[in-house]
Amino acid sequence: MDVAVLGAHGQIARHLTQRLARRGDRVRGLVRNTDHHEDVRADGADPVTHDVEHDPVDALVEHVRGAHAVVFAAGAGPGSGAARKETVDYGGAAALLEAAGEAPVDRYVMISAMGTDDPPGDDEVFSVYLRAKARADEELMASDLEWTVVRPGRLTDEPATGLVTLDRHVERGAIPRADVAEVVVACLDEPRTAGHVFEVVGGETPIDDALDALVRGG
C-alpha cells in the first residue's frame, strides 16, 4: 500500500508511519518543516515538504498523486489560536480533500476528534477547534471519496493495548495515541469501513472485532 500522511510529524502520525513501514508499505510523510525530515525518514517514510497554510493545492495534488490512500493527521496543536484552527484543522483537511479529488486518490481517512457534534461553550478556542474539525468532517462526508472519519477521545501516551470501544457515539474516555494509529491502519486495511464515522476510546474489544461489529451494524 502507498499512503500519503499529511502532518507526518504529529504523534499519532509517527505511530502510524512506523506501523505501516514495518510491514512494508510505502509512506509519504508530508510535513511543513524541513527540520522534521530526519525524524520522518527514521520512522520509515519518504519526507515531503508541504505547508498547507501557504503552499498551493496544485502542489499537494502532485505530492499525493499515485497513492492508494491519504490520511489527514495534521493539526495546529496546543497553544495555537483560533485563526490557526481554521487554517490548519479545517483548511488543511479541505485542501487534502481537494487534492485527493484531483489526483485522484479515492481513499481518505480523517483523524478527527470526539465532541465535534456538540462543542462546549466554555472554551472559545477549543470550541473553534471542534467546529473546524466538524466542518472538515462534513465536507469529506459529502464528497464522492471512500472516506472514514475516526474521532478519538482524550489522547494519552500510554502503550498500545489493541483494545477499544468504538461506535457512532461512545462515552467520553481516553485512548493511547498508539491505539488510534492502529485503528487507522485497520481502517486502511478494511474497505468496509468506508462511509463510516465513529468515536473511539480505550476498551476491551480487539480493534478488528470492534470495526467488524461497526460495519455489520451499518
Image: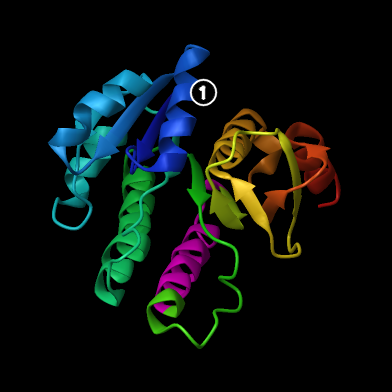
In this view, the residue farthest toward the bottom is 121
In this view, the residue farthest toward the front is 158
Residue 201 vs 69, above or below: the answer is below
Residue 10 vs 53, above or below: the answer is above
Magenta stretch holds residue 200? no
Q: Left or right of 44: which side holds 69?
A: right
Q: Residue at x 52, y 66 (%)?
A: 138
Task: Choose between 175 and 116: the one closer to the eye.
Answer: 175
Please indicate, yes or no, whether residue 1 appears anywhere in the rendered image.
Answer: no
- Residue 105's image quarter? top left
Q: Main secondary structure of the magenta part?
A: helix
Please indicate, yes or no, whether residue 153 appears anywhere in the rendered image.
Answer: yes
Q: Left or right of 9: which side holds 180?
A: right
Question: Which percent across, then down, holds residue 148?
Answer: 59, 48
Q: Residue at x 54, y 79 (%)?
A: 119
Protein image colouring: rainbow
Q: Residue at x 75, y 32 (%)?
A: 208
- Residue 30's image quarter? top left
Task: Choose between 105 and 26: the one closer to the eye.
Answer: 26
Question: Which percent across, then down, holds residue 31?
Answer: 24, 40
- Amino acid under label 1? Arg
Q: Which residue is mark 1?
A: 19
Say how many tags the image has. Answer: 1
Q: Left or right of 89: which side holds 199?
A: right
Q: Residue at x 49, y 44 (%)?
A: 108
Question: Which percent across, then down, holds residue 145?
Answer: 51, 47
Neighbour class for label 1 at 10 Å: few (<14), some, many (≥20)? some
Magenta stretch holds residue 141? yes
Task: Choose between 202 and 152: the one closer to the eye.
Answer: 202
Q: Which residues are magenta?
A: 128-147
Name the secondary structure under disc 1.
helix
